Image: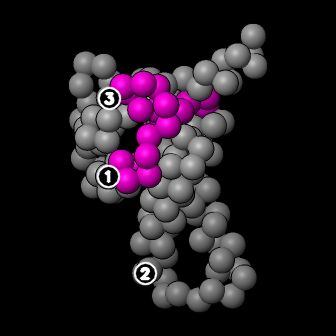
Amino acid sequence: MGFGPRLGAYLIDAVVANLIVGALYLAGLGYAGDVRGLAIYLVFLLEEFILISTGGQTIGMRLLGMRVIRLRDRGRQSWPWIGVRTLLLALLVPVVIWDRDQRGLHDRAAGTVVVRDPARADSAS
């Protein structure tokens, strides 16, 4: 999966995280103005961890037809490895450094790869 679709998915997920933090604020959860960026970042990471470990894809990935799978058998990776992937994603550096197969360092460390969603490809046919 190329860099463009991944960036698009990250941007969609960032907007979702921003909307969640905004909705929590409107619901009465108060926080200092300088904490809002950190709150959005933490919600983004929590969204990544929960959605990828339970369904293999985030909202952005689902909209753009991508999925995270375990490289060795194309199954869903276990949550501890998705935790490793998410922690490395939090550092941002592994995301922009990838190998010739276009796997980021966070995916290599977790034994995962981002692919086109086979379920979405089947339904499009």
User: Looking at the rendered structure, which numbered label has been put on residue 84?
Assistant: 1
Of the residues shown, which amino acid type is indicated by label 3? Arg
Classify 119 as above or below 14: above
Question: Residue at 52% across / 46% down in the picture?
Answer: 52
Residue 35 image point, x, y percent: 44, 80
Residue segment shown in magenta: 64-82
Quadrant in the picture for the N terminus? top left
Nearer mark to the viewer, of 2 and 1: 1
N-term-proximal mark, 1 vs 3: 1
First along the sequence among labels 2 and 1: 2
| Quadrant of the image containing the C terminus | top right
Q: Would you say residue 51 sits in the magenta stretch?
A: no
| Amino acid on which disc 2 is placed | Asp
User: Which residue is more in the foreground, 15 or 111?
Assistant: 111
Measured in 3D between alpha carbons, the distance from the residue under mark 2 to the one under mark 3, in whole angstroms, is 34 Å
Residue 78 lies in the magenta-colored region: yes
- State left or right for residue 73 relative to residue 21: left
Q: Give the mark nearer the N terminus: 2 vs 3.
A: 2
The dot on residue 103 is 3
Residue at point 55%, 30% (across, down) = 66
Element under label 3?
Answer: loop
Marking on residue 34: 2
Q: Residue at x 32, y 52 (%)?
A: 84
* Residue 34: image location, x then y, percent: 43, 81
